[in-house]
Image: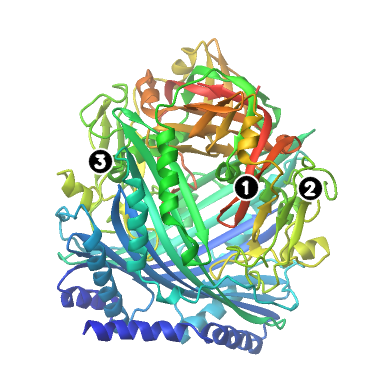
């Protein structure tokens, strides 16, 4: 009986792949047309995910999920409405079209509401692992085991949570403007949060993260080793005197401190609404000469890559900042219309929401020196392993606690520190980045070097 | 066959213990920015979560295939996953704490009635557009505005191996207004928000949308005129919103039994003094209208009040059924899942400090050199060590017992239990203050938190 059940589920899964999504999209576009709507966009998404979770050093939960849904955007007399559902029977889909139309009827018209015209789309290589469909929860349990083997080399270390996941994404889109396409991608992630405990002393939480479009490329044992060493290094942390000095951000801490404000500042919507600090900086210097930022959705093997964005446009390579000068903002169709230009394919989101604006693979250039060379040149400063605090993307003010921090004195890492706060203004600091490391790391869809910032206020409680 | 019958049939058919949860969410999200309706989204997300407990290990499968065959297949996969995991799992689950096999419908008749009187979609959009316009019309110093509204109407059916059979209707909604201001070379952002369990009418039962818009404008203007200060150790007054943030973020997470087992700051400290004896802190799900309201949790446990700290003594942790059995106590209804695609985790509901007997004015008058701190600005974080850092939305100097100039760029940090030990006055007031608050722990949860005004010592981070 069990075998039959497995077969039923497997067959159902098969039905979901193939051309089903695209077929639903096209059918709904036709139906929308016949209902007299001006424009229709239907976005289909199927996400199959497997995940194994470790908690408290022990295997906790194997999980399996298949989400399959569509989102419809309709346009009538300049008004737009959106509705989505994961209930895909015929009646629900009819109701969905009606609901989207009701949303549009009740919304005020906006002359910038529009769908983009079709552009040529190309497959991005190396973003789909053919073996993904064969990966079972049992394989992920095995990954979890190799990870834990490393962690357990030292019994002071506790993994709070760790997740090992496999995801298969199928997207399809059809619009009344002639866009008809589908794409697929796989990605595999390992993320873990751990702490160390020795007697009464508890270290900070620290994290380790790996991602790849290919299962074989993850090195979970390496991830376990690194995390173990990091939390052990933050045991025995001491307080220090306050000082002004340099900070070296790890790629991980740079995500919060650097990337989030950068992504906010180059979002065309924020520029148009006057809340980006770079609203009038097009072509002007916004950062030190050594900073170059590329966003490339066509990058082979990139987790943020794909054949099309949320509106069915190609996600071409963009130079966002070149030698410290602001070159390109991120646009979707709506903000592009507001700016009187074409979208550059940065519409983000899935079937459950309207398109927002998002980067694809957001890459900060590396520098000439290695991380260790950068450290060796620091007179007195702090290695910021993880940053836990706020960054106000509007003003750029940040203030927060350094986790897993290491004091650097005359070019050497001397001791782990605790309860250290750093504060300042990130946009001002960007103007004087003192160094970028040669090494870069992938964190989600970001590729980042170590970043050296000068003259930061480092205070100890 | 109706869904409840299907779920029951799967439970009956399975030799192993299974728990099935049907969860349908109809949600509406509206957002207006600078006079444009930037989001009007209606979403339906529905499906069934199957959790199996086999040989001391969990398996979890979620599916939107609601046919009998689909559910059978999902249950079989969950059982198989649990069995596979069981081979590797070291600390086998010894079982689940017993719960009352609750049966019945928790449909909140008055809520259903209220829903009928909701303004229609067009009216809601119009009111949001008006509030957004009101913000920008406040003056030239206000450069941008945003109004966001979201609502969930959740319908759930939970059926478990030991006879729980409940139907729940759970509507929640929230509203937020953001004002962006500018003067000379600076820009600032401030927000005002509110959330409830219930309908639109309940959301605006004791405040108007226009009041929230005025509040956001007032706050951003204060931030524009405010100066920076230098940091240090100070005596401060925390408002109910910040007390809520402290209770939830810095204390609440450390007492979630899963964090406790991972070695949080309160591991093994039940019965110890962890706060001033003026402090009593609780988590309580079933509070009418509160944004974090839970009547029956996602394991089918009836929600009750858990006293975490009583007069300064640590009394209880927060539990699900698994941890409650391990800690030899009863679960209080803290197992929550955000959607059918999520497994229940130990979560807070409404977490708050009980009011005391002091007068706020007198509390302020007792401070020689300190700050009056209100609300959280962008966010904050806390660790299992109970060390925390929050940035403050609205702050004033207190000099010689008098409230003085507004200041900004302040962060509040410390070790939460040390802060609670330093409490020397608790006001008579009480408010929930998380507004549109969501808690993130891998998955989201709608929560609220609050309390009275507290006087205590904290580390202030400044930017002067």
The residue wearing badge 1 is: A439
Please tell me whether residue A69 is drawn above or below residue B233 in the rendered image: below
Quadrant in which the C terminus of chain B is drawn: top right
Looking at the picture, tell me which residue is in the foreground, B275 or A79.
B275
Foreground: disc 3 or disc 1: 1
Looking at the picture, tell me which residue is in the foreground, B277 or B73.
B73
Tell me how far mark 2 sits from mark 1, CA to CA: 32 Å
Do marks 2 and 1 share a chain? yes
The residue wearing badge 2 is: A279
Tell me how far mark 3 sits from mark 1, CA to CA: 50 Å
**Mark 3 element type:** strand
Quadrant in which the N terminus of chain B is drawn: bottom left
* The quadrant where residue B453 appears: top left
Q: Are marks 3 and 1 in contact (CB under 8 Å)?
A: no
Q: Position of residue B207 (x, y in %)?
A: 52, 44
Please tell me whether residue B460 is drawn above or below residue A432 in the rendered image: above
Residue lying at 34% horizontally and 25% vertically, measured from the top left: B356
Please tell me whether residue A459 is drawn above or below residue B441 in the rendered image: above
Mark 2 crowdedness (10 Å alpha carbons): few <14, some 14-19, many ≥20: some
The subunit letter for the residue under badge 3 reads: B
Q: Position of residue B408 (x, y in %)?
A: 62, 28
The subunit letter for the residue under badge 1 reads: A
The subunit letter for the residue under badge 2 reads: A
* The quadrant where residue A158 appears: top left
**Mark 1 element type:** strand
**Mark 2 element type:** loop
Foreground: disc 3 or disc 2: 2
Q: Which mark is residue B306?
A: 3
Q: Position of residue B98 (x, y in %)?
A: 14, 54
Please tell me whether residue A183 is drawn above or below residue B386 in the rendered image: below
- Can residue B342 be seen here? The reply is no
């Amino acid at each position: 009986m069990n075998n039959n059940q497995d077969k039923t589920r497997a067959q159902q899964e098969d039905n979901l792949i193939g051309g089903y999504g695209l077929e639903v999209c096209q059918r709904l576009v036709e139906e929308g047309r016949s209902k007299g709507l001006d424009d229709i966009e239907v976005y289909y998404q199927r996400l199959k995910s497997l995940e194994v979770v470790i908690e408290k050093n022990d295997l906790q939960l194997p999980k399996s999920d298949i989400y399959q849904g569509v989102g419809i955007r309709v346009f009538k007399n300049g008004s737009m409405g959106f509705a989505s559902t994961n209930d895909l029977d015929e009646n629900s889909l009819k109701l969905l079209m009606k609901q989207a139309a009701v949303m549009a009827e009740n919304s005020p018209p906006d002359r910038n509401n529009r769908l983009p015209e079709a552009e040529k789309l190309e497959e991005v290589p190396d973003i789909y692992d053919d073996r993904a469909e064969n990966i079972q929860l049992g394989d992920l349990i095995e990954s979890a085991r190799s990870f834990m083997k490393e962690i357990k080399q030292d019994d002071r270390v506790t993994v709070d949570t760790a997740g090992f996941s496999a995801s298969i994404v199928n997207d399809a889109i059809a619009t009344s403007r002639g866009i008809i396409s589908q794409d697929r991608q796989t990605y595999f992630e390992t993320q873990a949060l751990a702490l160390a405990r020795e007697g009464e002393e508890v270290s900070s939480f620290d994290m380790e993260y790996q991602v790849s479009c290919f299962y074989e490329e993850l090195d979970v044992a390496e991830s376990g080793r690194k995390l173990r060493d990091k939390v052990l290094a933050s045991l025995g942390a001491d307080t220090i005197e306050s000082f002004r000095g340099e900070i070296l951000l790890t790629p991980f801490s740079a995500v919060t401190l650097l990337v989030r404000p950068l992504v906010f500042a180059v979002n065309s919507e924020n520029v148009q609404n006057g809340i980006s600090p770079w609203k009038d900086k097009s072509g002007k210097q916004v950062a030190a000469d050594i900073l170059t930022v590329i966003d490339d959705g066509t990058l082979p093997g990139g987790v943020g890559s794909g054949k099309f964005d949320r509106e069915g446009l190609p996600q071409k390579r963009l130079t966002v900042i070149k030698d410290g000068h602001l070159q390109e903002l991120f646009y979707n169709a709506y903000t592009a219309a507001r700016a009187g230009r074409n979208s550059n394919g940065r519409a983000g989101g899935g079937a459950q929401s309207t398109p927002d604006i998002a980067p694809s693979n957001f890459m900060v250039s590396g520098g000439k020196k290695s991380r260790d060379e950068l450290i060796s040149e620091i007179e007195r400063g702090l290695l910021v392993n993880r940053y836990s605090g706020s960054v106000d993307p509007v003003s750029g003010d940040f203030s927060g606690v350094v986790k897993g921090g290491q004091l650097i004195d005359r070019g050497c890492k001397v001791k782990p520190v605790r309860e250290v706060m750093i504060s300042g203004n990130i946009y001002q600091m960007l103007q004087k980045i003192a160094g970028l490391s040669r090494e870069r790391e992938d964190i989600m869809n970001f590729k980042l070097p170590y970043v050296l910032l000068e003259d930061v206020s480092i205070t100890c409680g | 066959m109706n869904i409840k019958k299907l779920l029951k049939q799967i439970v009956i058919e399975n030799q192993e213990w299974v728990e099935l949860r049907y969860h349908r969410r109809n949600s509406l999200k509206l957002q207006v920015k600078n006079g444009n309706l930037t989001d009007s989204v209606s979403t339906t997300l529905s499906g069934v979560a199957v959790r199996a407990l086999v040989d001391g290990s969990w398996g979890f499968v979620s599916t939107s295939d609601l046919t009998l065959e689909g559910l059978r297949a999902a249950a079989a996969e969950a059982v198989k996953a649990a069995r596979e995991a069981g081979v590797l799992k070291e600390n086998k689950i010894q079982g689940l704490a017993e719960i009352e096999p609750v049966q019945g419908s928790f449909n909140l008749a008055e809520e259903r009635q209220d829903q009928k009187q909701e303004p229609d979609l067009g009216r809601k959009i119009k009111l949001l557009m008006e509030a957004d316009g009101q913000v920008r019309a406040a003056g030239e110093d206000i450069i941008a505005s945003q109004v966001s509204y979201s609502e969930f109407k959740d319908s759930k059916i939970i059926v478990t191996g030991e006879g729980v059979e409940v139907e729940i209707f759970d509507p929640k909604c929230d509203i937020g207004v953001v004002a962006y201001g500018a003067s000379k070379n600076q820009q600032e952002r401030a927000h005002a928000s509110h959330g409830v369990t219930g309908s639109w009418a309940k959301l605006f039962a004791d405040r108007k949308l226009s009041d929230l818009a005025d509040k956001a404008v007032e706050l951003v203007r204060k931030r524009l005129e405010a100066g920076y200060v230098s940091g240090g150790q100070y005596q401060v007054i925390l408002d109910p919103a910040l007390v809520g943030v402290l209770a939830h973020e810095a204390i609440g997470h450390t007492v979630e039994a899963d964090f406790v087992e991972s070695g949080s700051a309160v591991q093994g400290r039940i019965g110890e003094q962890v706060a001033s004896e003026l402090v009593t802190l609780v988590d309580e799900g079933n509070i009418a209208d509160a944004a974090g309201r839970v009547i029956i949790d996602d394991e089918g446990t009836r929600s009750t009040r858990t006293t975490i700290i009583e007069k300064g003594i640590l009394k209880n942790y927060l539990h699900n059924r698994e941890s409650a059995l391990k800690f030899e106590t009863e679960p209080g209804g803290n197992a929550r899942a955000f959607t059918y695609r999520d497994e229940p985790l130990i979560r807070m509901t409404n977490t708050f400090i009980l009011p005391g007997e002091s007068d706020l004015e007198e509390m302020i008058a007792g401070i020689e050199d300190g700050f009056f701190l209100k609300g959280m600005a962008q966010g904050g974080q806390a660790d299992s060590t109970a060390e925390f850092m929050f940035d403050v939305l609205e702050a004033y100097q207190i000099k010689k017992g008098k409230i003085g100039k507004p200041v900004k760029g302040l962060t509040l940090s410390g070790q939460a239990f040390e802060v609670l030990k330093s409490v020397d006055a608790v006001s008579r007031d009480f408010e929930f203050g998380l507004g549109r608050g969501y808690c993130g722990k891998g998955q989201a949860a709608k929560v609220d938190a609050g309390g009275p005004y507290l006087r205590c010592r904290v580390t202030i981070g400044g930017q002067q």
